[in-house]
Image: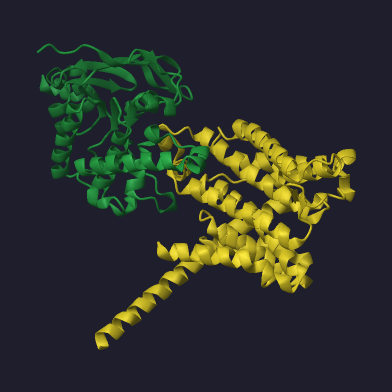
Chain colours: A green, B yellow
Amino acid sequence: MTKTTTQLLEVEDLTKAFSGVAAINGVSFTVPQGVIKALIGPNGAGKTTMLNMISGLIRPDSGTILFEGNGIRRSPPHEISRKGIGRTFQLLRLFTTNNATVLENVLLGANNLIKPNILKSVFLRRVINAQEQEAREAAFETLRFLGIEDTALLSPLALSFGKQRMVELARALMSSPKLLLLDEPASGLNDAEVDGFMETLLTIRAKGITILVIEHNMKVVMNLAEHITVIDFGEKIAEGTPYEIASNPNVIRAYLGDDHISEGE
Amino acid sequence: MLRRYATGAAILIFLGLYPVTFGATSTYHCAIMIVLGIYVILAVSLDLLVGFAGQLSLGHGAFYAIGAYTSGILTATYQMSPTGAMVIGACLTGVIAAILGWSVLSLKGYYLAMATMGLTAITHSVIIGWQSLTGGASGLRDVPAFHLFGLALESYDSYYYVVWILAILVVLACLAIVRSPMGRTLMALHSDEAAASTLGINCSFHKTCTFVASAVFASIAGSLYAHYMGFLAPDDFSIFTSIHLLVMVFLGGVGTLYGAALGAIFLKLLPELTHTFQDYELLGSGIILILILVFMPQGLWGLLSIAGRKMLAHLSVQAESKGVRQ
C-alpha cells in the first residue's frame, strides 16, 4: 500500500518571541493527511505555544502556516475552527458559567453547524430547533463513543479529571475537524484510562481525522505516532519515526542531559 | 412544564385584567404599572447583556435617553407619528450601539463599562447643551400621547396595553435568545472567550449583536416613556439611571431574566411605598447593591427559587409520610 503524501498542515520557519525571549525559533514541520503525528520536547520547549499559533490563539511573529495549502497565519481562531481545525487544552477549559452541563459543552462543538445568531433564534425558531435536534443526536453519539453518555446532564465539575478530558475531546470532535490538535491528552489519566484512550485515538484516526498530539507519556507517543517532531528551547532538534527518535543522541541529550550520553558511551 | 404554563397564564390574566380591576380604582394604579412595564423592558434587556453575554454596561440609560428624545423631538417638534418615531429611534440607537460595540467589544475585559459610561456622559451633555433641539435643562415639552392607526391612546388604561404588550414581546424575545443555541453561545463566550473561539464562535460579533439588541430594546422603552410622560427632563437620563438599572438586575438575580423583571418591579415600587425617603434613593440603591453582592449573589429570584424548591420538597415529604401512615 502506498502511503499518501498529501500534507494537511505545513508549518514553515515559524517564530514567536514573548517580550524578547524566543519561544519558537524558526521551526518547520508537516503533518501528512491521515496520520497521528506527535510533537514532543521537554517542559518549556514551546510545544503549547506552537499549538496556540496553529489554532490562532497566538499570532506568530513570522513564518507561514498552511492548512490544506491555504495560509492561516493571520486568521482569527474562529475562522481556523471553521476551516476544520479542532483542539483540546492541556489545562482543561470547559464551560461552567450558569450551571452549564456536559451536554451543553459538547453541543457547543456544533456551533459551526448551527451557526446561531440573535435574529435566527427569535425569528427562525423552527429552523434552529431542527438543527438543535440533529446536533443533540450527534452529541449523544459522540458521548457514547467516548463512554461518557451517562454524564450528559451533569456539570463538568462533578466529573473525574479523566472524564473531563473526554468531555473536552467530545466537544472538539463535535466540530467535525479534519485536523485535531491535542495538548497532553493523556496527562492525569490512570494506566487503564491511558490504554482506553489509545484505542480511542486509533478509532478517531480510522474515521479520517488527522491528529497532531503533544504528549509526555512515551507509551502513547511510541505506540501511536507514525511520525515525531522534537523541539527543545523553541528549536527543532530531531524528526523521524519513533524508532529513529528513540535512538537520536540530540533527543537523549535534551531529555536527560549531556552526562547521560557520555556515561552511555 | 405544566406548572410553567400555568404561571405564565396566571401572569397574562393578571396583566390583561389589571386595568379593569385594580387599575380601575384610580388612574395612579394604572400609571404606576406603565412605569413598571417600561422598567421591565429596560432591566430584562440589560440582563441579556450583563447576565448572559457577561458584558457590563453603564450606557443603558443613554440608549433609553436616545429613544426617548428621538421620539419626543420627532413627534413634538416635527409632528411625526409615534410608531414611526419609535422605529427611527430604535434604528438610530442600533447604529450608535453597533459603532461603539464594534470598536470596543473586540477587546476583552471591562472596556465596555468605561466606554458606555463615557457615552452616558456625552448623551447627557448633548441633551443639556443642544437647547434648540432638546429643550436643554428646562426639558422637552408637549410630547403628544401615543396614537396607533389614528386612534389616540390618551387614557392610561389604553396606553397600559401598548406598554405591556411590548414588554411581554421583549421578554419573550430575550427568552427565545437565551434558551436557544444562541444562549449557549453567549454562555460559552462569557465563560471562556479563547476556548469559545476555538469552537468557531466569533466572540466580538456575538457580543456586539447582543449589545445592539439590548440597546434597541432600551430605546423602545425610552420611546414609551416619552409618550407616557409627555415631558422629558435631562436628569431622568443621567449616569444614575444606568447605575439604578444595574442595581435592579443584580438585586433581582443576574442571568435569569425573570430576576431582572422582579428587581425592576421591586425597586420601582419601593419609593412609591416610601415617598418620604426619596432624597435618599441613590444612597439606598448603593447600599442595596453592596448587600446583594455580598450576601445573596443570586438575587431575589435566587431566594425565591430556593424557597419554592424547599416548599415543594416539604410538601412532598408530608405527602409521603401521610401515605406511609395510611
Q: Position of residue A162 (x, y in %)?
A: 24, 45
Q: Is residue B268 above or below residue A242?
A: below
Q: Position of residue A227 (x, y in %)?
A: 19, 20
Pick whichever, A165 or B152, lies toward us: B152
Outermost residue toward the front? B150
Q: Residue at x 68, y 54 (%)?
A: B162
Q: Is residue A164 above or below residue B159?
A: above
In the displayed structure, does residue A178 sit left or right of residue B262?
A: left
Q: Is residue B159 above or below residue A37?
A: below
Is residue B278 in view? yes
In the displayed structure, does residue A222 sit left or right of residue A157?
A: left
Q: Position of residue A37 (x, y in %)?
A: 22, 23
Q: Residue at x 85, y 42 (%)?
A: B134
Q: Position of residue A88 (x, y in %)?
A: 32, 35
Q: Residue at x 32, y 18 (%)?
A: A235
Screen quadrant of the N terminus of chain A = top left
Q: Residue at x 30, y 28 (%)?
A: A177
For residue B191, what is the image quadrant? top left
Is residue A93 in view? no
How many marks can you see?
0
For residue B289, what is the image quadrant? bottom right
Screen quadrant of the C terminus of chain A = top left
In the displayed structure, does residue A36 sit left or right of residue B62?
A: left
